[in-house]
Amino acid sequence: MPGVDDVFAALSDPTRREVLRSVAQRPELTASRLAGELPITRQAVAKHLAALQKAGLVEPRREGRETRYTLTPAPLIDAMDWMAEVGAEWDSRLARLVERARG
Amino acid sequence: MPGVDDVFAALSDPTRREVLRSVAQRPELTASRLAGELPITRQAVAKHLAALQKAGLVEPRREGRETRYTLTPAPLIDAMDWMAEVGAEWDSRLARLVERARG
DNA sequence: CTGTCGTGCAACCAAGGAGTTGCTGATGCC
DNA sequence: GGCATCAGCAACTCCTTGGTTGCACGACAG
């Protein structure tokens, strides 16, 4: 039950956004494999994944000796909700955008 | 011409989000007035406003000896776009999974 | 002109966070 | 069993940053 606070905090770092995008693109990604594609160590990737997990954006699944990560995009909607709420007084078009994104 | 990077960085701080929300609700707000409503000094508010301005989320307008700030919500759309893009990649991943399961 | 109010700039401090290295513990393969 | 991986934990180093105080300058009221 992470709040908007954790979500925005997680998205604030460019490397972490890159990690999130990688997890979104490739299924069942592990920290070691991800570290092989990024210019940082495995431990750094693990920290990013922990932050993303705290924000509820990613879900670990233990498979033998490796842990695979999966995107859980629900908190993204909450963040978009917050932005729409801020923009609501200013421009009602934002609210309509989110409505459409939610499906 | 600020990028998504500055926007997410600006939104990462709770106090700064509070500032942004205040500016969104009450247009033509000044730093001193804002500082009166928050438990921080005027200079801290000014720094937050500077960060928001760098992200293109707010626009200053000099009026005599005071500067009034106005919300410019356009970069919020960019940030929402980024999130929607990540979600879309996730959806296509799901689609591929379903495709494979269908055989 | 003088005092006051609102701003901006600079230096400084404390806390947090990104990234690293080093080690230990499991798990899988020969 | 023995070795190579993958992962988790801890401590440490920098660098960023949110917040502060102090000061100096421009604008308005008396």
Image: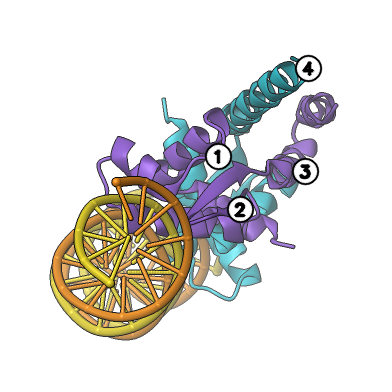
Chain colours: A purple, B cyan, C orange, D yellow
CA–CA distance between discs 1 and 2? 9 Å
CA–CA distance between discs 1 and 3? 34 Å
Q: Which residue is mark 3?
A: A85
SS class of the residue under badge 1? Answer: loop
CA–CA distance between discs 1 and 4? 19 Å
- What amino acid is at disc 2? Arg
Q: Which mark is residue A61?
A: 2
Number of marks drawn: 4
Q: Nearer the viewer, residue C16 or A29?
A: A29
Q: What is the x, y in percent for residue B85? A: 60, 25
Q: Are marks 1 and 2 in contact (CB under 8 Å)?
A: yes
- Label 3 vs label 2, nearer the camera: 2
SS class of the residue under badge 3? Answer: helix
Mark closer to the chain start, 1 or 2: 1
Q: Chain of mark 4?
A: B
Q: Chain of mark 2?
A: A
Q: Which mark is residue A28?
A: 1
CA–CA distance between discs 2 and 4? 24 Å
Q: Which residue is mark 4?
A: B102
- Residue A79 visible within the image: yes
